[in-house]
């Protein structure tokens, strides 16, 4: 009876050790695998459009004309685009202004880590140099779905402006910019800060 108990205990111990090892292995694979989709999702996939002459010229000059140009939306006089699957530069994001043939990309960012857990925001804001350092002169950029607000702060950490991204992008024109904005912060829907940059 004692021998049978010892054998049962040994068998149980072996099963427990195997279960623990399997759990550890699966946990390790999960940590090294892809992040949960909700952390990096971008709902606005855009609408494929034909480029204007001005946009096409920029795409050719930047070696991104082989990608798929998609219109993401418009705020004020600024239109937001993505250029997907370019052969040399990966996915790109740009903003354009102007009407008709004069509609032209004036900003294009390619090959960034956006969208990702570490890069939930792709910022293309404009900076201005002042006697006391750089400050934000215009805000514009793209976000993943979980970004609920973009905050502009001064050097003391006070919030000067707060934007809610629309269709995964944000924009605040120069004429509406508060002075002394030197920091941008992104928060998720629970108010947790998930990204930050300084004017430079």
Image (tube, rainbow, N blue to C red):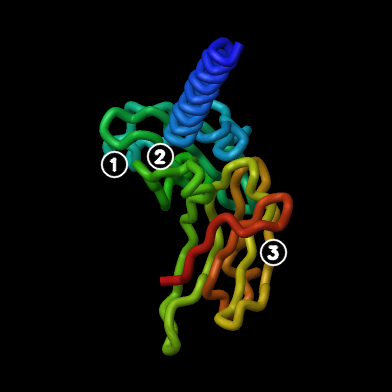
Residue at image point 51% right, 35% down: 35
Helix, strand or loop at label 1? It is loop
Image quarter for residue 85? top left
Which residue is disc 2 drawn over?
92
Label 2 to label 1: alpha-carbon separation: 10 Å
Coordinates of residue 37 in the picture (x, y in percent): 58, 31
Rate crowding at label 3 as few (under 14), some (14 to 19) or many (20 or more) other CA atoms within 10 Å: some
Image coordinates for residue 64, horizontal then vertical, percent: 32, 35
Nearest to N terminus: mark 3 or mark 1: 1
Quadrant in which the C terminus appears: bottom left
| Nearer mark to the viewer, of 3 and 1 | 3
Nearer to us of marks 2 and 1 is 2
Camera sees residue 73? yes
- Residue at 49% over, 25% down: 17
Pointer 1: what residue?
62
User: Where is mark 3, residue-wise?
Assistant: 162
Q: What residue is rendered at 34% in x and 30% in y?
A: 86
């Amino acid at each position: 009876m004692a021998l049978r108990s010892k054998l049962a205990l040994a068998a149980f111990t072996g099963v427990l050790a195997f279960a623990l090892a399997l759990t550890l292995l699966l946990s390790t694979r999960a940590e090294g695998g892809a992040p949960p989709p909700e952390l990096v999702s971008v709902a606005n996939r855009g609408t494929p459009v034909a480029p204007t002459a001005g946009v096409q010229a920029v795409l050719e000059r930047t070696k991104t004309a082989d990608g798929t140009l998609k219109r993401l939306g418009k705020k004020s006089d600024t239109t937001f685009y993505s250029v997907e699957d370019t052969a040399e530069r990966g996915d790109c994001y740009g903003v354009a202004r102007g009407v008709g043939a004069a509609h032209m990309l004036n900003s294009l960012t390619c090959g960034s880590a956006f969208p990702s857990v570490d890069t939930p925001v792709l910022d293309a804001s404009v900076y201005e140099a002042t006697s006391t350092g750089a400050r934000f002169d215009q805000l514009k950029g793209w976000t993943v779905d979980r970004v609920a607000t973009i905050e502009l702060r001064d050097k003391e950490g006070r919030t000067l402006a707060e934007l809610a991204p629309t269709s995964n992008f944000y924009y605040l024109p120069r004429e509406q910019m508060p002075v002394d904005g030197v920091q941008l912060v992104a928060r998720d829907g629970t108010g947790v800060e998930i990204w930050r940059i300084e004017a430079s």
